Image (cartoon, rainbow, N blue to C red):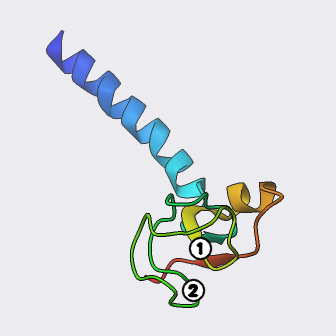
Amino acid sequence: MIKSALRAAIAAAITLTPGAVLADDKGKCYGVAKAEHNDCAAKDNSHTCAAQAKKDYDANDWVSMSKTDCEKDPKNKGWEEAKK
């Protein structure tokens, strides 16, 4: 009984793994952050940390998201791949 449950769990894990490989890598989506909801430093170095954006949708502030999701947002000002 335990062996069959273990086999089923392993089979389910193997089946789900390829979907994760197909997901977009996250990167920086500029222009979509609301004030005080950015993820890190601004592109123009006007601030150096998260949650310091002064205005909504500033082209220099970014939020981490997939390229696909970034491109769907009409406010986006560009996407940059995360450095690896």
Residue density around tag 2, few if under 14, some if 14–19, many if 20 or more, within 10 Å: few
Secondary structure under tag 1 reads loop
At horizontal 56% and vertical 69% (from top left) the residue drawn is 54
Residue 25 in view in this figure: no
Q: Is residue 39 above or below residue 11?
A: below
Residue that numbered label 1 is attached to = 61
The answer to which of 37 and 67 lies nearer the viewer is 37
Residue that numbered label 2 is attached to = 43
Residue 4 position, x and y percent, is 25, 17
Residue found at the very far right of the displayed protein:
74
Q: Are marks 1 and 2 in contact (CB under 8 Å)?
A: yes
At horizontal 41% and vertical 82% (from top left) the residue drawn is 48
Is tag 1's residue or tag 2's residue first in the polypeptide sequence? 2
At horizontal 41% and vertical 68% (from top left) the residue drawn is 50
At horizontal 57% and vertical 86% (from top left) the residue drawn is 43
The answer to which of 34 and 32 lies nearer the viewer is 34
The answer to which of 70 and 23 lies nearer the viewer is 70
User: Total number of numbered labels?
Assistant: 2
In which quadrant will I find the C terminus?
bottom left
Residue 78 in view in this figure: yes
Residue found at the very far front of the displayed protein:
54
Image quadrant in which you'd find residue 30: bottom right
Residue density around tag 1, few if under 14, some if 14–19, many if 20 or more, within 10 Å: many
Residue 14 position, x and y percent, is 41, 40
In which quadrant will I find the N terminus?
top left
